[in-house]
Amino acid sequence: MKRKVTKAIFPVAGLGTRFLPATKSIPKEIMTLVDRPLIQYAIDEARAAGIKEFIFVTSRGKSALEDYFDAAPVVEAELRRKGKKDLLELLKMTNMESGAIAYIRQQKALGLGHAVWCARRLIADEPFAVILPDDVIASEKPCLQQMMEAYAETGGNMVAAMEVPADKASSYGVLDIREDMGALVSVSGMVEKPKAHEAPSNLAVIGRYILTPRIMDNLNKKKSGAAGEIQLTDAIATEIAAANNVYGFRFRGQRFDCGSKAGFLQATVAFGLARDDLHDEFAAFLHEMVSVRKAAE
Ligand code: UTP
């Protein structure tokens, strides 16, 4: 029987240099998409997928992230006094149950694989999910939940996958496809950031994973790969040869790369337009901006 996945790792120890100077003092994951920090979208997605234990791999300068999940008694008391029930409810949804959340430090930014490995003792011998909060996915059914449903059939290791243009493949981990079954593909190889002409397909890995505890054993060997970092992709690829149980999952939804400025702006537009309370005013503004620009051309 497949074990239920109840633990998720959120690697948030990166330096976020693409958002300097903002990330000099605020963690990237606290940056706001409409009115919620990126991390809240990741937590909501994990909860919807049945995750009960939330493990953050953090680093120096990330204390705003830890504070975000604390109760806010002063603000709550003020909202209660003013009878602002809606805002109180909204705030309460951000509180985490005591004991549900753990913070582990990654002392040096040695790569995503290393960040995941830092959580090995909390994972022990259970399967686990990994969510990268800078990949934000707009979808009817949250991406990790879609993956959990597929995983209930396959078990093994599963990575979220998305078709990307050939000239962009070298920015991702890319799958070599053994068998294409539609939403699911079985994988015969994985390459992190391949050179343009060496990508085995245009099916790229994005930041959602369901992994077996053996991935931690593979990470134990700590060999550095592409860009001199310890790559999660390499630890997963090792399982292809050892157990032949790695799957890609084409999720239904739109992914935004909120680790990049253009991606963050696109997400802001998409999530802003999707909000009932903002749509009309925001759509009218965007329309006007585009018309003014067209007229100027
Ligand atoms: P990125 O490649 O986006 O790196 O990491 P980064 O440092 O966050 O951002 P830039 O490139 O400098 O702008 C992908 C994910 O892996 C985590 C990051 O926090 C992010 O969620 N990560 C990366 C770690 O936790 N530790 C690392 O050593 C590297």
Image (cartoon, helix red, strand yellow):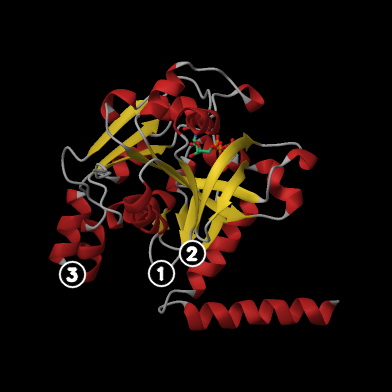
Structural crowding at the residue carrying mark 3, measured as other residues with C-alpha within 10 Å and reported as few (<14), some (14–19) or many (≥20): few
Read off the residue under disc 2: 252
Residue 260, can we see it? no
- Which type of secondary structure does the marked residue at label 2 adopt? loop
Callout 3, which amino acid?
A: Lys
Considering only order in the chain, which callout, 2 or 3, is on the residue closer to the N terminus? 3
Nearer to us: label 1 or label 2: 2
Left/right placement of residue 278 relative to residue 191 reads: left
Q: How many marks?
A: 3
Distance Cα–Cα, label 3 vs label 2: 34 Å
Which residue appears at 51% of the width and 81% of the height? 281
Q: Name which residue lies at 56% across and 80% down.
A: 283
Marks 1 and 2, the one that precedes in the sequence = 1
Of circles 3 and 1, which is in front?
1
Q: Which residue is mark 1?
A: 140
Mark 1–mark 2 CB contact (< 8 Å): yes
Residue appearing at x 51%, y 28% in the figure = 238
Disc number for residue 85: 3
Provide residue 117's location: percent of width, then percent of height: 41, 25
Quadrant (top left/top right/bottom left/bottom right) for the N terminus: top left
Task: Using a 10 Å C-alpha cutoff, classify the residue at mark 2 as few (fewer than 14 neighbours), some (14 to 19) or many (20 or more).
Answer: some
Residue 52 x %, y % = 22, 45
From the viewer's side, name the closer residue of 215 and 271. Answer: 215
Residues 134 and 222: in front is: 222
Q: Which mark is drawn over residue 238?
A: none
Which amino acid type is marked by label 2? Arg
- The answer to whether 232 is drawn above or below residue 91 in the figure is above
